[in-house]
Image: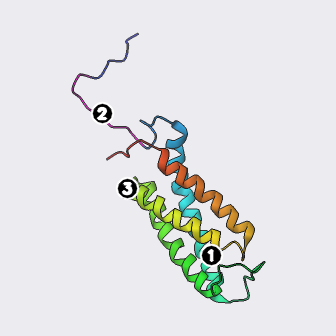
Amino acid sequence: MSQPSAPTPGSTSRPAAYGADSGNPWAGGGTLFAGFLLLVDGVLGVIKGVAGIATNDVYAAVNDYVFKFNVTTWGWIHLILGVVLIFVGWGILKGATWARAVGIALVSLNLIANFMWLPYTPIWAIVTIAIDVFIIWALCTDRSRPAI
């Protein structure tokens, strides 16, 4: 039985995929999962946006809150964020280096928008906030580099 040979001194090796060289394997797998969740989060944002733009009667505020916008305005905000999140999620799945930083920034904006959206759909907003928190964690903790 032969033993695997050690790499020669001075040679560099790159990880084969996300998470291959990560200190935390949960974070490496989480990055791939975060890419899919970004796609799903974007699609949900597009659905929320279209529903808000289509008619003002779809969503009604549960209580009287400080954050008051027209539902159509919220619809456009969610639609635009949703479309951009879909592209960023696709970029993360393709291994684009820019997508992680842009993903953290945009998911943070999406989290804030959904916090302000709480009066209209509390359960849906809380679920989206939880998804966004996981995405931010996964994108911030994965230290591996995508294969080039």
**Which image quadrant for residue 78?**
bottom right
Q: Which of disc 3 and disc 1 is earlier in sequence?
A: 1
Image coordinates of residue 94 in percent, x first then y, are 41, 55
Q: Mark 3: which secondary structure?
A: loop
- For badge 1, the amino acid type reads Ile
Q: In which quarter of the image is the N terminus?
A: top left
| Distance from the alpha carbon under mark 2 to that under mark 3 | 19 Å
- Extreme residue in the front direction: 66
Q: Which residue is drawn at 45% across and 37% down?
A: 22
- Extreme residue in the left direction: 10
Q: Residues within 10 Å of mark 2 (few under 14, many from 20)?
A: few
Q: Residues within 10 Å of mark 3 (few under 14, many from 20)?
A: some
Give the residue number, with chain letter if any, for mark 1: 47
Q: Which residue is drawn at 35% across and 45% down?
A: 147
User: Is residue 142 rendered to the left or right of residue 146?
Assistant: right
Could you say which disc has been placed on residue 13 in the image?
A: 2
Could you say which disc has been placed on residue 96 in the image?
A: 3
